[in-house]
């Protein structure tokens, strides 16, 4: 089995902190490590098990810190290495584990290695750490950047360099021994400091096909088909080595793959015995609002992961996608539909076997902010498409903590957050929802408390009650003396609620019926229906 059955990670609830938008301690408008320390009580009250921090390393911030110039230092924008150590100690004292981002596919164009490659000239050994190719007036192949446009930029008159993301993020050549040795050292640097795990950015992208052949088709980034730059077999040898490093530490340290691959079976390859502990389940995140679709994806995910002895993971939002309180109602009318569906989907997710990832602010029911002024947007996607695509800033707006006016407690009074916060967020702040029994914040707190206290939830078995084509999704999480039944109504009409003791519902039952776009948990006898 991949890891111990008692591993904390198999059914952990892990909360993603997008550092620059969580809490600002010094008033410069950007969240920081000290701000996180000041708000750890919120995470403890919420009931999560671990915190995942997005990059806080030294960076020119061309891509929000995912363009790293030094993986072993903290950018002054976020604090100091001493601040990180203080955060780690404070989190551990609260019973929270800490996971950090590692970004091995690329570095910043201001990284010392790339600066040296630029200065060294054609055919210099310094350039071998990157994918540098000779070329004429056209790029060496037809690869496209995730951030739009060609994935190649000129290094000088004779050479081009590869960047699957922004030009400020040159891809590393993982065939070079310096690259492998460098990241082994980076892992040990942070593991020695006491971090509990790593999240691997673009885990499917490190190895490119030999010769860097053309893709040969338009739209390859979106069609889900194989490409010569993603999900190559060679990545697995790297992760087997990394797993051996992680296994040398006590207590347990885990690794989570961000791997956008073609289906749960491909994702399961990253968590086979001897490889990584978890892989994000983006197939669940991408599922349409349909009971048959959810049932199919849940079933495929559980089957694929069970086959390799790994836990399934579940995620609805993160810093790269439209918040699910908006996404789940895309194309539909009705002001509150998105939030109703988001609350229901959250109850579904928290009832599933495996580990759960939450994105900061979803516990407040925050929607996507689509109307940010162009002058405030910083995502390179917005700039590289000249505004044709809004990019990801809308899910990264700083959190509202308190008060009735910006910055809503995100920073000191009078400070200006790096992205403007909507006026209506005053009613969505932590303080505004804290004592409201019907708030989304209280729904999350109650659901997480039940998940932790009820042995039926978390890791374990799932038994379907509903049929594959039903409009209601219903399953049992069996226990010894009782079971928990989760039901979610994705149809257009109310349905009779299951018989049993109602533990929690995302919306009030009316005349004993579960409304459309609502979900609930019931305690039922363990032996059957």
Image (spheres, helix red, strand yellow):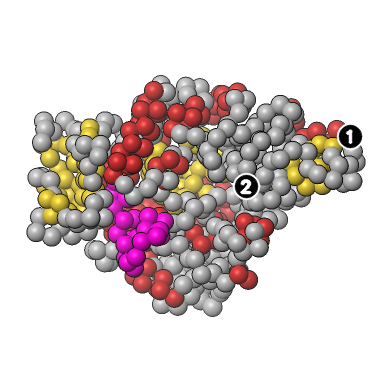
- Please tell me whether mark 1 sits on a helix, a strand or a loop: loop
The spot of residue 248 in percent (x, y) is 54, 25
Q: Residue at x 67, y 31 (%)?
A: 208
Does the segment drawn in magenta span residue 280?
A: no
Image quadrant holding the C terminus, namely top left
The spot of residue 108 in percent (x, y) is 72, 48
**Relative to 372, does residue 167 appear above or below in the rendering?**
above
Q: Mark 2 points at which residue?
A: 146
Q: Mark 1 points at which residue?
A: 123
Q: Is the magenta stretch mostly helix, strand or loop?
A: helix
Estimate the spatial distance between the alpha carbons at disc 1 and disc 2, rounded to whole Å. Answer: 28 Å
**Which residues make up the magenta segment?**
326-348
Task: Return the mark for residue 414.
Answer: none
Disc count in the image? 2
Residue 124 as seen in the image, left or right of residue 423: right
Locate residue 236: give its quadrant: top right
The spot of residue 115 in percent (x, y) is 82, 46
Residue 487 as seen in the image, left or right of residue 115: left
Q: Earlier in the sequence, mark 1 or mark 2?
A: 1
């Amino acid at each position: 089995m991949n890891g111990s059955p008692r591993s904390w990670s198999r059914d952990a609830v892990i909360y993603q902190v997008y550092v620059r938008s969580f809490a600002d301690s010094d008033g410069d408008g950007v969240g920081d490590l000290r701000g996180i320390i000041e708000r750890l009580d919120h995470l403890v009250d919420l009931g999560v098990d671990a915190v995942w921090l997005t990059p806080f390393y030294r960076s020119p911030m061309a891509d929000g810190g995912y363009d790293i110039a030094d993986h072993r230092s903290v950018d002054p924008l976020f604090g100091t290495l001493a601040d990180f150590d203080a955060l780690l100690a404070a989190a551990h004292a609260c019973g929270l584990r800490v996971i950090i981002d590692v970004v091995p596919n690329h570095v910043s164009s201001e990284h010392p290695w790339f600066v040296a490659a630029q200065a060294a000239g054609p055919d210099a050994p310094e350039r071998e750490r990157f994918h540098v190719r000779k070329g004429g007036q056209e790029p060496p192949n037809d690869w496209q950047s995730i951030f739009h446009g060609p994935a190649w930029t000129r290094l000088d008159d004779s050479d081009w360099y590869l960047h699957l993301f922004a030009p400020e993020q040159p891809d590393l050549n993982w065939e070079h021994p310096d690259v492998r040795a460098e990241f082994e050292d980076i892992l040990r640097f942070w593991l020695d400091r006491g971090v509990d795990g790593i999240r691997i950015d673009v885990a499917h992208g490190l190895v490119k096909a030999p010769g860097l052949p053309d893709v040969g088709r338009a739209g390859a980034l979106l069609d889900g088909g194989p490409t010569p730059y993603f999900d190559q077999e060679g990545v697995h040898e790297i992760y087997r080595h990394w797993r051996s490093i992680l296994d040398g530490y006590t207590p347990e340290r885990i690794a989570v793959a961000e791997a956008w691959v073609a289906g749960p079976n491909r994702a399961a390859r990253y968590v086979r015995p001897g490889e990584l502990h978890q892989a994000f389940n983006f197939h669940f995140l991408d599922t349409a609002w349909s009971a048959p679709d959810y049932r199919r994806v849940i079933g495929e995910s559980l089957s694929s992961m069970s086959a390799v002895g790994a836990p399934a993971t579940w995620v609805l939002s993160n810093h790269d996608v439209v918040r699910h309180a908006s996404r789940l109602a895309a194309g539909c009318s009705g002001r509150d539909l998105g939030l109703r569906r988001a609350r229901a989907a959250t109850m579904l997710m928290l009832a599933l076997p495996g580990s759960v990832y939450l994105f900061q602010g979803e516990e407040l029911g925050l929607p996507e902010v689509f109307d940010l002024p162009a002058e405030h947007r910083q995502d390179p996607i917005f700039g590289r498409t000249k505004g044709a695509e809004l990019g990801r800033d809308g899910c990264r707006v700083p959190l509202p903590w308190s008060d009735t006016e910006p910055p809503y407690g995100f920073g000191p009074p009078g400070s200006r957050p790096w992205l403007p916060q909507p006026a209506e967020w005053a009613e969505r702040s932590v303080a505004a929802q804290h004592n409201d029994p019907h708030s989304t914040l209280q729904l999350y707190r109650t659901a997480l408390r039940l998940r932790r206290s009820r042995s039926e939830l978390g890791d374990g078995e799932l038994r379907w009650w509903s049929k594959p084509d039903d409009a209601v999704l219903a399953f049992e999480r069996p226990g010894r003396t009782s079971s928990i039944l989760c039901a979610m109504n994705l149809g257009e009409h109310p349905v009779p609620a299951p018989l049993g003791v109602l533990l929690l519902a995302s919306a009030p039952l009316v005349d004993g019926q579960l409304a459309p776009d609502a979900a609930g948990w019931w305690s039922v006898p363990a032996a059957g229906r």
